[in-house]
């Protein structure tokens, strides 16, 4: 039978802020997170929330799925014309589309709002057993949200090893 022993922890108090400098209660390295709490009348400036008409993760996921379906040939390219920048749409038409087996499916989507009227998204995309990266940028126009950048980053092809014979 195993016996367990309880050990007392070292004192670990998070640092606190005094006159815009950090004061540690425990000598470094304390490996503690800094609590960024307002002290003595300080104010924390937060980023303003995005406007209500800004697409959320679910809506951006639907847009990305629609564009990916057009990229792999499951959807006609004409259907994505309203949500693509004209240069992107012509690039989609010009590319020799070859339908990959299984198609593309976005998995995790992360959003960033660098400024008002802009949403940047990065996602992992699954294609069979492969995992690809996706980066996209959507901008608000008078006609609605339009994808202005779209990059599906595929891993480099594997180079077969060379055999040298003597």
Image (cartoon, grey):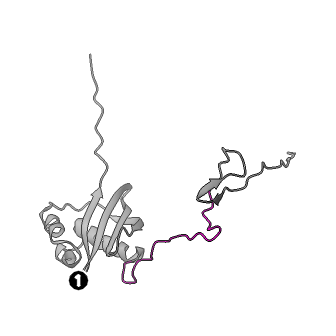
Task: Give above or below for 53 relative to 109.
Answer: below
Residue 46: x %, y % from top left: 50, 71
Residue at left offset 40%, top offset 68%: 111
Q: For mark 1, does the 10 Å Cα neighbourhood hold few (<14), some (14 to 19), or many (20 or more) residues?
A: few
Task: Give above or below for 165 relative to 21.
Answer: above
Q: Secondary structure at mark 1?
A: loop
Residue 23 among those drawn in magenta = no
Query: Of helix, strand and loop, which mostly describes the magenta segment?
Result: loop
Which residues, given as a range, are shown in magenta? 33-55
Which residue is more in the foreground, 25 or 62?
25
Horizontal placement of 144 versus 108: left or right? left
Residue 144: x %, y % from top left: 26, 82
Residue at left offset 15%, top offset 61%: 95
- Where is residue 124, by image quadrant? bottom left
- Where is residue 67, by image quadrant? bottom left
Please say whether residue 137 is visible from this viewpoint: yes
Q: Which image quarter is the C terminus in?
A: top left
| Residue marked by disc 1 | 142
- Residue lying furthest front: 19
Residue at left offset 62%, top offset 57%: 34
Which residue is more in the foreground, 166 or 134?
134
Which residue is more in the foreground, 80 or 43?
43
Horizontal placement of 52 versus 86: left or right? right
Q: Which image quarter is the N terminus in?
A: top right
Which residue is more in the foreground, 38 or 125?
38
Residue 92: x %, y % from top left: 17, 66
């Amino acid at each position: 039978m195993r016996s367990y022993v309880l050990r007392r922890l070292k004192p670990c108090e998070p640092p606190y802020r005094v006159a815009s400098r950090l004061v540690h209660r425990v000598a470094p390295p304390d490996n503690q997170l800094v609590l960024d709490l307002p002290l003595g009348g300080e104010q924390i400036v937060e980023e303003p929330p995005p406007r209500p008409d800004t697409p959320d993760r679910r809506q951006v996921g639907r847009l990305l799925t629609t564009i990916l379906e057009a990229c792999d040939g499951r959807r006609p390219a004409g259907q994505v014309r309203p949500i693509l920048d004209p240069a992107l749409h012509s690039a989609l038409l010009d590319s020799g589309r070859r339908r990959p087996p299984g198609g593309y499916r976005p998995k995790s989507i992360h959003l960033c709002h660098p400024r008002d009227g802009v949403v940047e998204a990065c996602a992992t995309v699954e294609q069979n057993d492969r995992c690809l990266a996706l980066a996209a940028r959507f901008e608000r126009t008078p006609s609605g949200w339009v994808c202005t950048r779209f990059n599906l980053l595929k891993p480099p092809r594997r180079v077969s090893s060379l055999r040298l014979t003597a």
